[in-house]
Amino acid sequence: MACFYVDVKSVNLFLFMSVFFQIFLVALSFAYFAKALSGSYMKSTITQLERRFDIPSYLIGVIDGSFEIGNLLVIAFVSYFGAKLHRPKIIAMGCVLMSIGTFIIALPHFLIGRYEYETSVRWVENSTLSPAPCRAGLPAELTQDVITLLSAIPFWFLPRSLPVPGPHFQRKDNDEQKGFIKDHPHLKKKYTADEHTGFIEMAKDFIPTLRTLLAHPVYLIYLCVTVIQLNSLIGMVTYKPKYIEQHFRQSASKANFLMGVINIPAVALGMFSGGLLMKRFKLNIMGAAKFAFSTSLIGYVLSMFFFAMSCENAKVAGVTLSYDKIDEISYDKHSLFTACNRDCVCSSNEWDPVCGENGITYLSPCLAGCSTSAGLRNNTVFSNCSCIGVGGNLTANTGQCLEKDDCDSMFPYFLALSVITSFIISLGGTPGYMLLIRCIKPELKSLALGFHTLATRTLAGIPAPIYFGAIIDTTCLRWGQKKCGGIGACRIYNTTAYRIAYLGLTLSLRTVSFIICIPGFILLGRQLKKEEQDAIHALSNGGTELEALRKEECVILNSDQPLHTPENSTDRHTRL
């Protein structure tokens, strides 16, 4: 146990350091909250952005991945100058830049006109009302901008660094504590955060150090596994609300609300519990690797049950269902026209869905064969629809049909399985991160973490939303048409193909990562065995050298002592 000699000055210094450190932690936590707020808001508006700007999913993936592109533009600057300049102020400037970015995201709300709903009905009515600007999204966009800006304020008032204890705060380490490399006082001099070193000197050390890091086989395999796993995770999380909307026919607000209220707490609890379990069972490097692998494998097996939670395609005349009520998945614009609407002169590009009394959705009132209507806007009722009933007297309402089938009863089970899977997978988050820390030499940890962040953002954060969106686009049955020409957002998906593509791609990536883990365990075992043998060898050599030193010391001591004669011994015995 370490012995401390502390006086009043050292106590005051400790309290001073503690207060500033607590302020820094609170400010940093608030900054992370602001970052998570803006990022989650972006992912929650994917469906709305597709409809608002009439763009496909892969382009949404490009927009979402551009967040990581912006990070990569400044990561080199921050990594180099961050250790030399005022770090709290650099964080504050980053928060200000992030606030500017969130405001730029909100600019289209102010610069472009109101959204015009696509409809095939032309309304002619007398009204004294003037159109008012739409302000539905204004509070959310400005709220995240203000919160991000406020998160920068505390960092402007923090000191550049915490004061270093001086001679009044002395510490005496025991032999066990001196065994920690970074705390040993006899190490050779290294660059510190407050030293001013030349760029050329650092550049000379950078290339050999990076070469040494990339030559580490365990680190390379860990990096590959992490990149592939994050591709699966980022792609799945990005389009999970959209999957819930399309597959289980839930509203966008409900899907995002459930993601935030149910999944995110499960992930947070899982990561915290994983850290507690690792501390409770005192897992070593191999134990942490096996624990992270086991939790990921269990989550992988549970995720396969999502394939069984299938829902039927929505009944849309001419797309998933013929006008003769025969199931068909292949879409052709000629299949939209039949005898009941042939004389209506309808357009195949219109998207103004109506729900007939027969429970089938039609792409427009015209394609449903409706000839009359009553009401306004969303309360419109179309009648005399020749394609809905034989007599032509059945009606249709605006909007798609809200079908009540087995999907409604299956959705709670989907949520429960999603929460359990998220919790189990996140249990391995903390042990997996500790594996990265422990398998690398101390002098390579900073570079290893930085390169890991760079690789995951470049190879996972940017491409995953793009190719996930592109594959989801292949399951589209009915594309929207832009007014200026070209393909817009998808209107109707093939539910079965969507499920197979979305879940299949997610699990396929994780399957590849598990295969790569096999040589990783082998190499990690060899590395640990080699380190153990080196430690035993060093201990035995140290014991031999220590024994030799002891013998040499005994010889020197014996040579310095005077020789005792038997007479002296006899006299001493006699006197005693």
Image (spheres, grey):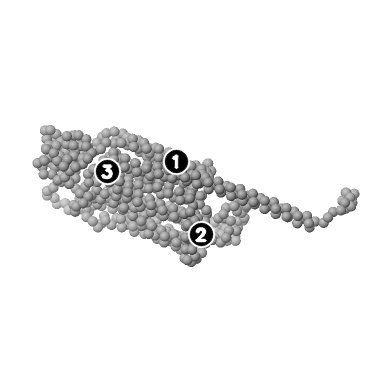
Asked whether, in this view, residue 172 is left or right of residue 296, the answer is: right
Residue 475's label in the rendered image is: 3
Q: Residue at x 59, y 60 (%)?
A: 168
Residue 465 drawn at (x, y percent): 33, 49
Q: What residue type is labelled 1?
A: Thr
Q: How crowded is mark 2: few (under 14 residues within 10 Å), some or many (20 or more)?
A: some
Q: Nearer the viewer, residue 12 or 104?
A: 104
Q: What residue type is labelled 2?
A: Leu
Residue 539 drawn at (x, y percent): 63, 49
Residue 147 drawn at (x, y percent): 36, 54
Number of numbered discs overlaid on the protein picture: 3
97 in relation to 278, above or below: below
The answer to whether mark 1 and mark 3 are in CB contact below 8 A is no
Tell which circle, 1 or 3, labels the residue nearer the N-terminal end.
1
Q: How crowded is mark 3: few (under 14 residues within 10 Å), some or many (20 or more)?
A: many
> In the rendered image, which residue does mark 1 sit on?
295
- Secondary structure type for disc 1: helix
> In the rendered image, which residue does mark 2 sit on?
162
Q: Residue at x 70, y 54 (%)?
A: 549
Q: What's the distance in space between the residues labelled 3 and 2, CA to CA?
A: 56 Å
Q: What residue type is labelled 3?
A: Thr
The image quarter containing residue 142 is bottom left
Q: What's the distance in space between the residues labelled 1 and 3, CA to CA?
A: 32 Å
Q: Can residue 385 be seen in this view?
A: no
- Secondary structure type for disc 3: loop
For the residues carrying marks 2 and 1, which lies nearer the camera in this image? 1
Tell which circle, 2 or 1, labels the residue nearer the N-terminal end.
2
Q: What's the distance in space between the residues labelled 2 and 1, CA to CA?
A: 39 Å
Q: Which of 531 and 502 is in front in this view?
A: 531
The answer to whether mark 2 and mark 1 are in CB contact below 8 A is no
Q: Residue at x 36, y 56 (%)?
A: 69
Q: Residue at x 49, y 58 (%)?
A: 209
